[in-house]
Each structure stands twice: as structure tokens, then as C-alpha cells.
Amino acid sequence: MIVPVVVVLLNGVAIPAAPPAELVAGRVMVPIAPVVTRFAERVAFAAFGAVVIEAHGHRCTLRVGVAVAACDDRVEPLEYAPYEHEGVLFVPLGDVARALGGAIAFDPASSTVQVWLEPDRRLETPPPSGAPPGGPVPALTPGPTPTPAQPDSGPSPRPRRTPLPALPS
């Protein structure tokens, strides 16, 4: 059986995956590592084939072979049960992304799935040291100081403008 390979984009950036994401029964199944670990804050493997995924203030527990997940103290059905193939755990990307507060869109023509998840925190540039709180205050920056003209101390050597005679080889 040939399983179509799917490219996963997280907020517009491709996630290289080995093994790659797969399209199984019309559902995008992704390996926990490296795909889910890119957007989850914590992934832990528990007893009896369970995996706990935490991100963005949400927590989901999934089990291999069980099409139900416990997310944020709710039990939710999954589109497809997580499975293990050649030692790699695959989970349904759509269910996991939505449970963690994200959105997905699949393009069957290009076999690409887009996942959008807001970052937990936005990076901000701190004010320079010594700057007042609330941001820097505009200041006048002086321009370059003009240099005074230097008096000629004498004639400067000028380049030779006459051609040199050719030397025989």
C-alpha cells in the first residue's frame, strides 16, 4: 500500500520531517517528532501507549489505537486513531492542532497542509540601558563636524602623464 506524503507548513514555514507526514484515510497523520515537537511546549510519553501534548495553555492525552483524546478535561473523538509504525508514533494533525488552539487547511492538489498557531509570546526589543521606562525619547543627533581646510604645505607630487618606453622582451 502506497501512502501519499504530505508537506507540513507551520505558520508558513516548512517543517522537515523524517519520516514524513502521511495521508491516511483522508486524514493527515504526522510523526510526534519532529512535527508536533515544533509547536508543542511539552511532549511526554506515558504508560500504556499514551502521549501527553501541552501547548498554549492546553493539554491533550492521546493513546495508540484509541480514536478518543482527553483534551483540557474534555473527552473528544479523533478523526483517526494514533498509530505506531516502525517505532514512530503518528497522530492526527487536525485534531491535535485544533485542540491546542490552532487552525489547519489542507491543499490536496499540492499535498500541503498549513498549520497556524500563535506564538506563546511575542518578542519585543527591550529599551536601551539607561532609557526611561515607556520607550526612548527622541533626541537630536549632531551631524559630523566639518573639518577646516588644510593649507598647502608645498607642491604635491603629480602622477607622470608621459608614456614609458616599451622594453624589448
Image (tube, rainbow, N blue to C red):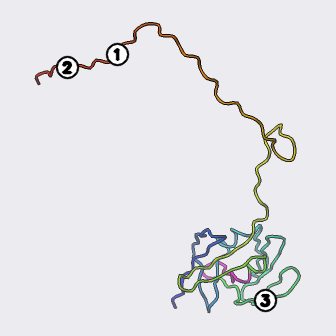
In front of the other: label 1 or label 3?
1
The percent coordinates of residue 160 (x first, y second) are 28, 17
Depth check: 54 or 150 in front?
Answer: 150
The label on residue 158 is 1
The residue positioned 51% from the left and 10% from the top of the image is: 151
The residue positioned 77% from the left and 71% from the top of the image is: 44
Label 1 sits on a secondary structure element that is loop
The answer to whether mark 1 and mark 3 are in CB contact below 8 A is no
Disc 2 designates what residue? 164
80, above or below 10, in the image: below
Disc 3 designates what residue? 68
In front of the other: label 2 or label 1?
1
Q: Residue pushed farthest left?
A: 168
Q: Quadrant of the C terminus?
A: top left
The percent coordinates of residue 22 (x first, y second) are 59, 83
> Please, what is the three-letter code of the amino acid marked with disc 3?
Val
Rendering quarter of residue 108: bottom right
Q: Residues within 10 Å of mark 3 (few under 14, many from 20)?
A: some
Distance of mark 2 from mark 1, alpha carbons?
A: 16 Å
The residue positioned 70% from the left and 69% from the top of the image is: 37
Distance of mark 1 from mark 3, alpha carbons?
A: 89 Å
Q: Residues within 10 Å of mark 1 (few under 14, many from 20)?
A: few
Residue 88 magenta-highlighted: yes
> Please, what is the three-letter code of the amino acid marked with disc 2?
Leu
Q: Residues within 10 Å of mark 2 (few under 14, many from 20)?
A: few
Q: Which residues are magenta?
A: 85-95
> Please, what is the three-letter code of the amino acid marked with disc 1?
Arg
